[in-house]
Amino acid sequence: MENKQLILGATIIGLVLLIGVLGIQAFLQPEEAFVKTRPNININEVAYKVAVGKPETILFEGATNNAGEKSSSEVTVYNQDLALVKDVRKIFMEKGLNIVQFKDIAAKIDATSVFFRDISNASTFVVEQNYEYDLVSKQKILEKYLDREITVETTEGQESKTYKGTLLSYADGILLETSEGIVTLPFDAKVTFPELPGGLLTKPTLVWKIFSETIGERLTETIYLTAGMNWRADYIAVVNKEDKNIDFKGWTTITNNSGTSYPDTKLKLVAGDVHRVVQSPKYRELYDYAVSEGAAAPQQYGQEELFEYYLYTLDRKTNIGNNETKQISLLASDNIPVNKEFVYDGQANGTKVQVKLNFKNSESQGLGIPLPKGIVRVYKQDSDGQLQFIGEDQIDHTKKEDDLELFLGNAFDVTGERTQVTYENISKGFYRGEYKIILENQKSEAIKVKVKENLGGNWTITKNSHAYDKKNSSEVEFNVDVPAKGETTITYTVEYRYYY
């Protein structure tokens, strides 16, 4: 019995020791422990440089493999200062663990949104990822050269003088310890450094540890989100002489301030208000969102539904330079029927009568595609045949068969005057008001004016000079004719009842 207990105790102690050793090995050799979870990987084939020091030093000392030039790219731009970039490059991989510098990326990249995949070999995977943005600058180099020797050249009076010594500080100017003592020099003095210190970059860089089971050149795709890119739709409408038709053209205006260029890229635009949270999107959500393809293009862009938005795909590749604004034609339709309308809302606009153009986003009217939100600028030819600007308005995202209304300005020759003639308190909760609206038209032709009245709640019109349409629970509209060089007067009486 005692022997059995001794054997059991020894076994337990042995297991504890074995687990401890394995735990220490896993702690001391994280890459080895990680690789053991991949059945086809030989730990002896995993070669990488191990150094003591800052993480960035280790990475850059071992980063001998750079991602090549972009073979192709695809950029999906949202009208919310956001773009989704899909960057395809060829990278040569050694068998085992590779440290790769991935440069020429957007300076405003959301590093947490990066998704990498090896198109040539699905077994390749990223072990570790770092986003390095410690960009080179005079201040950064001075920081690296603290307690090291530098050379500083400055102007003293009419002469140039050179100092050589150990950098003590650069907070309030440059403080040097020279053979002649400690010298204070201005920060804008010319500084010569023996070499560029390690760990500094000329542009933002992704640094990856990538494990590859085979050697060779790979086609890889990197997907990420970046700020600094935006797009909007801009429209031009030219009204004909009779104000009965318009020629309607649309342009997409893409602005790129992301910090890098996208040569020979496939361009896609998303119209819609995509919800974003403060935290970055998950990799899986990003990848699922990024796999859509465009449709055939009626103009330069094809359009298709994407979730609850619309995706516009340029039917050719284009170049998008950094710090560039590019315009590409979206649509062009001629002879679209429009209706010019005079609208008077005396409660909101005083004496001003608004002028609006109304038309339908319908295929039968010459349009019939989802229109992204944007500004519509309207022109008309003068008697010399020259186009003159007559107003602009902003439209929201507009689906097919919806009506569009453009407010262009206030009429010069048409005015209104709204007067409250009487207002009586008949009894508790019972009121009566009488209103008069005078419309004056100094134009040489008769016009029709839409008069809007907001009455509030619990109303009844008991007397009216002209017919009206009840638009909703609080608003009515009178549509009246106003003769040339004349006026029209609208009167109505309204009663309000409030129950307490």
Image (spheres, rainbow, N blue to C red):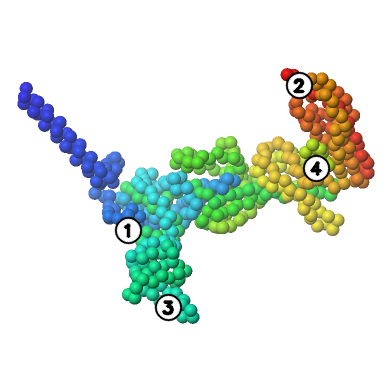
Camera-near label (1 vs 4) is 4
Q: Residues within 10 Å of mark 3 (few under 14, many from 20)?
A: few
Task: Give whichever of discs 1 and 4 has the lower sequence position.
Answer: 1
Q: Position of residue 295 (x, y in %)?
A: 59, 43
Q: Quadrant of the N terminus?
A: top left
Residue 480: image quadrant is top right
Pointer 3 with pointer 4, Cβ within 8 A:
no
The residue wearing badge 3 is: 161
Res 498 label: 2
Task: Give whichever of discs 3 and 2 has the lower sequence position.
Answer: 3
Task: Give whichever of discs 1 and 2 has the lower sequence position.
Answer: 1
Could you tell whether 17 is left or right of 214 in the image? left
Q: Amino acid at mark 3?
A: Lys
Q: How many numbered discs sit on the rendered protein?
A: 4
Per the image, label 4 sits on a secondary structure element best described as strand
Q: Residues within 10 Å of mark 4 (few under 14, many from 20)?
A: many
Q: Position of residue 276 (x, y in %)?
A: 53, 40
Q: Amino acid at mark 4?
A: Gln
Q: CA distance from mark 2 to mark 4?
A: 34 Å
Residue beneath the point at 63% across and 54% down: 327
Pointer 1 with pointer 4, Cβ within 8 A:
no
Res 61 label: 1
The residue wearing badge 4 is: 354
Q: CA distance from mark 1 to mark 2?
A: 82 Å
Pointer 1 with pointer 2, Cβ within 8 A:
no
